[in-house]
């Protein structure tokens, strides 16, 4: 049985496999904490772990500042920044509760090699992947808010032919189903 961290890392791996130009995939929660990361095999990262964590926090803050204009221009679907050494993209993954105040977010952070067709990769590969697996992110959002994620199992997300749940997922004193 896989832990939440292992499942999220597996999602990073699946996204990494969508295109050879992807250098890095990270998933950050709504507070900017990285919950999973993966670098392309053989890649020497340009930033260390602490700098990457700081970057994730800054990304979440930048996205939050853009929310002020949603009523005029709509919700952010993704953002792209081109730098001298790489291209970065941020894709918010939003789940709405019964009110906007109950919305939960994950942020997909991706870096690409220069000269990559980033818009095509995001729109033709990454966005369809997210849409196909939206319930998986929603489940993690639910469990991360309700449970100590180190204590629940089993959750099978990678085998699309199986049910998402087998049995009951127990979290310390709570029962999450």
Image (cartoon, rainbow, N blue to C red):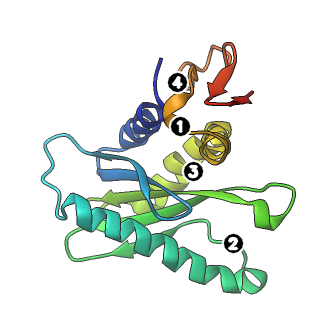
Along the horizontal axis of the image, is 38 left or right of 155?
left
- Label 3 and label 1: CA atoms lie apart by 26 Å
Label 3 crowd (10 A; few <14 / some 14-19 / many >=20): some
Question: In which image quadrant can residue 138 be found?
Answer: top right
Query: What residue is pinned by disc 2?
Result: 75
**Nearer the N terminus, badge 3 or badge 1?**
3
**Nearer-N-terminus badge (4/3):** 3
> Relative to 175, is 95 above or below?
below
Structural crowding at the residue carrying mark 2, measured as other residues with C-alpha within 10 Å and reported as few (<14), some (14–19) or many (≥20): few
Determine whether label 2 and label 3 are within 8 Å by CB: no
- Which residue position holds label 1? 149
Side of 53 where 63 appears, left or right: right
Residue 158: mark in rendering = 4
**Mark before the other along the chain sequence, 2 or 3:** 2
Task: Describe the element under mark 3 as helix, strand or loop.
Answer: helix
Taking the spot 68% from the left edge, 85% from the top edge, the residue there is 68
Which secondary structure, mark 2?
loop
The percent coordinates of residue 55 (x first, y second) are 34, 70
Q: Give coordinates of residue 58: x percent, y percent.
A: 42, 75
Q: Mark 4 against mark 3, which lies toward the viewer?
A: 4
Residue drawn at point x = 36 percent, y = 42 percent: 16
> Disc 4 on helix, strand or loop?
loop
Q: Name the residue under label 3.
A: 127
Mark 2 and mark 3: Cα distance apart in space: 15 Å
The quarter of the rendered structure image containing the C terminus is top right
Which of these two is toward me, 20 or 110? 110
Q: Label 1's element? A: helix
């Amino acid at each position: 049985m896989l832990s939440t961290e292992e499942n999220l890392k597996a999602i990073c791996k699946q996204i990494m496999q969508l295109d050879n130009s992807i250098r890095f995939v990270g998933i950050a929660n709504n507070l900017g904490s990285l919950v999973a990361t993966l670098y392309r095999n053989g890649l020497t990262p340009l930033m260390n772990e602490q700098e990457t964590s700081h970057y994730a926090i800054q990304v979440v803050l930048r996205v939050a500042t853009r929310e002020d204009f949603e009523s005029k221009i709509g919700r952010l679907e993704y953002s792209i920044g081109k730098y001298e050494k790489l291209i970065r993209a941020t894709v918010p993954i939003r789940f709405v509760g019964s009110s906007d105040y109950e919305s939960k977010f994950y942020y997909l952070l991706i870096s690409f090699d220069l000269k990559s067709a980033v818009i095509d990769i995001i729109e033709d590969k990454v966005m369809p992947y997210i849409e196909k697996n939206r319930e998986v992110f929603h489940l993690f959002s639910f469990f991360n808010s309700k449970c100590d994620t180190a204590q629940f199992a089993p959750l099978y997300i990678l085998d699309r032919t199986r049910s998402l749940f087998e049995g009951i997922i127990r979290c310390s004193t709570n029962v999450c189903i």
